[in-house]
Image (cartoon, rainbow, N blue to C red):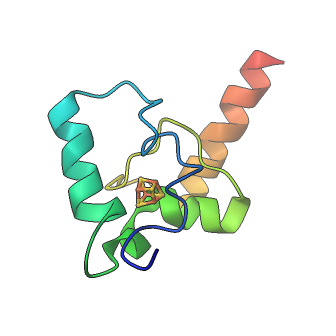
Amino acid sequence: MKNQCTFCFQCNLFKGKISLPEDVAIMYKYHYCLSQTEKWKQCKRYTFENINGYCPDFVMPNSLLTIDQIWQRTQQEYALQH
Ligand code: SF4
């Protein structure tokens, strides 16, 4: 479909697998995932996923973290788990 993010079917936020207040989830979907002006291209989850093939759940569409900061935090969390 044209007017939705190409990652909708693999994105945990879109699929409701990230715990968020319902109104916040709807707001993200309205403003990013299903944007009529392709605003998903400004979504930080979209950007990170496009580069790395996945996106950790702590990243929100309007995150102010840089891609490098997200990557570093992802590596730190992975190191703590293993
Ligand atoms: S949260 Fe971002 S990456 Fe996920 S479906 Fe919405 S626009 Fe796409």
Q: Position of residue 45 (x, y in %)?
A: 49, 56
Could you say which quadrant of the image residue 68 lies in?
bottom right
Residue at image location 41% in from the left, 34% down from the top: 16
Could you say which quadrant of the image residue 53 lies in?
bottom right
The residue most toward the right is 82
Instruction: Looking at the picture, tell me which residue is in the foreground, 66 or 5.
Output: 5
Question: Eyeballing the image, is 14 above or below 42?
Answer: above
Left of 53 or right of it: where is 17? Answer: left
Q: Position of residue 26 (x, y in %)?
A: 21, 44
Residue at image location 44% in from the left, 30% down from the top: 18
Screen quadrant of the C terminus: top right
Instruction: Looking at the picture, tell me which residue is in the foreground, 62 or 67.
Output: 62
Instruction: Looking at the picture, tell me which residue is in the foreground, 50 or 22.
Output: 22
Q: Position of residue 15 (x, y in %)?
A: 46, 40
The residue most toward the front is 1
Q: Position of residue 28 (x, y in %)?
A: 26, 51
Left of 81 or right of it: where is 74? Answer: left
Residue 68 visible, this orientation: yes
